Amino acid sequence: MTRDMTLGLQAALKRPTIEATPCRRPPRRFALALALAAAASVPARAVEVTDQRGASFIFEKPAERAVFLPMPAASTYIAINRGERGVAGMNAASAAAMRDGVLGKLFPGYARIATNITLGAGTAPNVESILALRPDAVFAWAAAGDDALASLERVGLKALGMRYGSQEDMAGYIGMMGLVAGQEARARELNERQGRELESMKAAFAGLDDARRPRVLYLARASDAYRASGRGSYNDFYIRLTGGANVAAGGPSSATVNIEQILAWNPQVVLLGNFDTVMPADLYADPRWQDVEAVRSRRVYRMPLGGYRWDPPSQESALTWIWLAGLLHPGGPAKDLRGAMRGWFDFLYGHALSDDEIDGVLFAKENRTSAGYERYLTR
């Protein structure tokens, strides 16, 4: 045998069988197994998350344990993440809203979530308690100051700053939460749904002249002092959005006012916030309020409490706008609030609201004797 023949035979013996039959493919099940094995060997794609102060963080995988210092944040994350899993700690005020509202009934596991994450009331972090929870991410107000965020970062925690005050701020932190939770598409859908309702409200009241805009006063507190929301507040935003005029718009975003100032403003509608215990009946019976037009016409309303309080920004803010627009313009076409609530709660929480649950969210008993509220009631 010649040298060339010997080399050719050796090459043929080394040649893989698959080359000898190039038209034949591996069995389908074998190919599927190969694909699954290859996918399992590839690590999850890391995600870069930029918070609302411009700091960037890398998450190798979706967060399994997150802590929320701002009050509305935990319920928003629960809605995005489809459950209370993944929430390791939250503000005690968030837990109170869940306990008093419907969210605690939908997700009873909230009661086991740690609430000792702040130093007293407010959002100042209790760093030692937070560290004990071994969180993958800690959400805090970006405007709380560098010291608050730095105290978390110094111990190696990923502290993500959230901004508060505008609809754009909320859309930003919803998107950020979606990235952290590995629920980008769901967060995007939540923002898109709210955006569509926002544009609908803008279109409905864009051409409304000032004379047809009811004078509205929002009171975050009214028991021990009157705390009004003015220029730059989220309450001012949705009062204007829904065709109202905020009587406190000339002042700061939050200010304590006296009854003399309220009498001078003479609001036609008063909204009572969910951070206090005062109800419409309290103002109707208060001698100091008898000359206020809102009391004389019985247009005082306690704001609803659903998965979270409807007065600050939340995942349910679109429902706040529908609710308020119907009360400010009782003679105009009203959207089906109860139907909208059912749709939103199904999307947010996978829950079909009953009539009794809707009445509870809307404070039907407490608001029943206020003008125009019958449009939201079934009996």
Image (cartoon, rainbow, N blue to C red):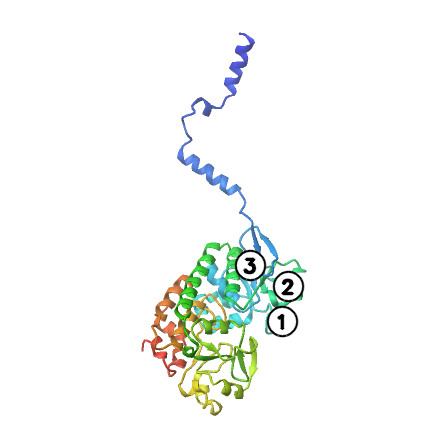
Q: Nearer the viewer, mark 3 or mark 2?
A: 2
83 or 303: nearer the viewer: 303
Residue indicated by mark 1: 119
Q: CA distance from mark 3 to mark 1?
A: 20 Å
Residue 339: assigned label: none
**Helix, strand or loop under label 1:** loop
The first of marks 2 and 1 along the sequence is 1
Check the image and report above or below for 65 versus 277: above
Sequence-earlier tag: 3 or 2: 3
Residue farthest to the left, as pictured: 379
Q: Secondary structure at mark 3?
A: loop
State the image quarter where residue 147 is shown: bottom right
Give the residue pinned by disc 3: 65
Within 10 angstroms of label 1, few (less than 14), some, or many (20 or more) residues? Answer: few
Going by the numbered disc 1, the residue's amino acid type is: Leu
Say which amino acid is labelled 3.
Answer: Arg
Residue 346 lies, in percent from the top left, at: 39, 63
